[in-house]
Image (cartoon, rainbow, N blue to C red):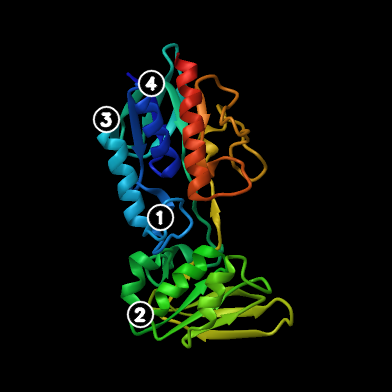
Amino acid sequence: MHDIIIVGGGPAGLTAAIYALRAGKSVLVIEKNGFGGQIAFSPKVENIPGFQMVTGTEFADKLTEQAMALGADVELEKVISVEKTDEGFAVSTEEGSTYNAQAVILALGVKHRTLGLEKEDELIGNGISFCAVCDGAFYAGQEVAMIGGGNSAMQEALLLSEVCTKVTIVQNLADFTGEKKLAQALSEKDNVQVLFNTVVTAYDTADGALTGLQLRNEKTGEVSAISVDGAFLAVGLQPENEPFAQLAKLNNWGYFDSAEDCCTQTPGLFVAGDCRSKYIRQVVTAAADGAIAAMAACRYLD
């Protein structure tokens, strides 16, 4: 029996672990993929206080090392349910394990959103990717598309422009939604083309692999097609909170409907990070949630 189980090993979950451990609590962090969360896939991060520039991987590693050095127990398993018990909570995983704690913090993060087009699921890993850091090298010397126009899309497009012969950015809006500094950097790249007001309507394939994109200009109605060797999706994120809806209320978009105190309607259950309803989803706000949730859990236990 741990004092606190934290579900999710991103910035929110790991910060919660650090604060709870420093308060003298025993902590188990359960993460289904890799510790660090989405930030681990960012090639360059320049908005974390104290770091002029740091790679997402480096930041994630340091955060994980800090929590483990303080004594956090960790497990790489996928949590599928959390149940209230007389002693606290029982946390069950897809691997068949059950862990018990007096309090639980859900820091589940979010997953990549897709376009919902035909053949999309089959093409993931066969031409469609979400991470330029992970897969960009596979397309060295080739032509790729980046779907999206936010900070993540622009950062990844810049990274791809260093190894690919051409990067076509497909953005459904009339302008980028990310930082102007990134937009300026892209405008200086000779091998980057930007198609604004444009959406992908279908994938072209051959032998089960991606070969191109069918496009439509939302402003003019013009349809076109481009040939690409790969496409990277950066069209937003979505929560996976439904399995826990009986314990923590969800809003209309599927995020935990919790206020800034990170509390839920279930005593002893707290939520933190990108999975929670909030205006800004950044590393600093996730870390802030982690600290708040951990202190709330400690007060509950005490």
Asked where in the image residue 101 lies, by quadrant, the reply is top left
Q: Is residue 73 left or right of residue 202?
A: left
Mark found first going from the N terminus, 1 or 3? 1
| Kind of residue at badge 4 | Ala
Alpha carbons under labels 2 and 4: distance apart: 48 Å
Disc 1 on helix, strand or loop?
Answer: loop
**Which residue, given by chain and number where applicable, does mark 4 sit on?**
101
Q: How many other residues sit within 10 Å of disc 1, few (<14), some (14-19) or many (≥20)?
A: few
**Which residue, given by chain and number where applicable, does mark 3 sit on?**
71
| Residue 201: % across, % down | 60, 74
Q: How many other residues sit within 10 Å of disc 2, few (<14), some (14-19) or many (≥20)?
A: some
At a point 65% along the width and 84% down the height, the residue shown is 223
Mark found first going from the N terminus, 4 or 3? 3
Mark found first going from the N terminus, 2 or 1? 1
Q: Nearer the viewer, mark 1 or mark 3?
A: 1
Q: Are marks 2 and 1 in contact (CB under 8 Å)?
A: no
Quadrant location of the C terminus in the rendered image: top left
Alpha carbons under labels 1 and 3: distance apart: 25 Å
Q: Nearer the viewer, mark 2 or mark 1?
A: 1
Quadrant location of the N terminus in the rendered image: top left
**Which residue, given by chain and number where applicable, does mark 1 sit on?**
51
Q: Are marks 3 and 2 in contact (CB under 8 Å)?
A: no
Asked where in the image residue 197 lies, by quadrant, the reply is bottom right
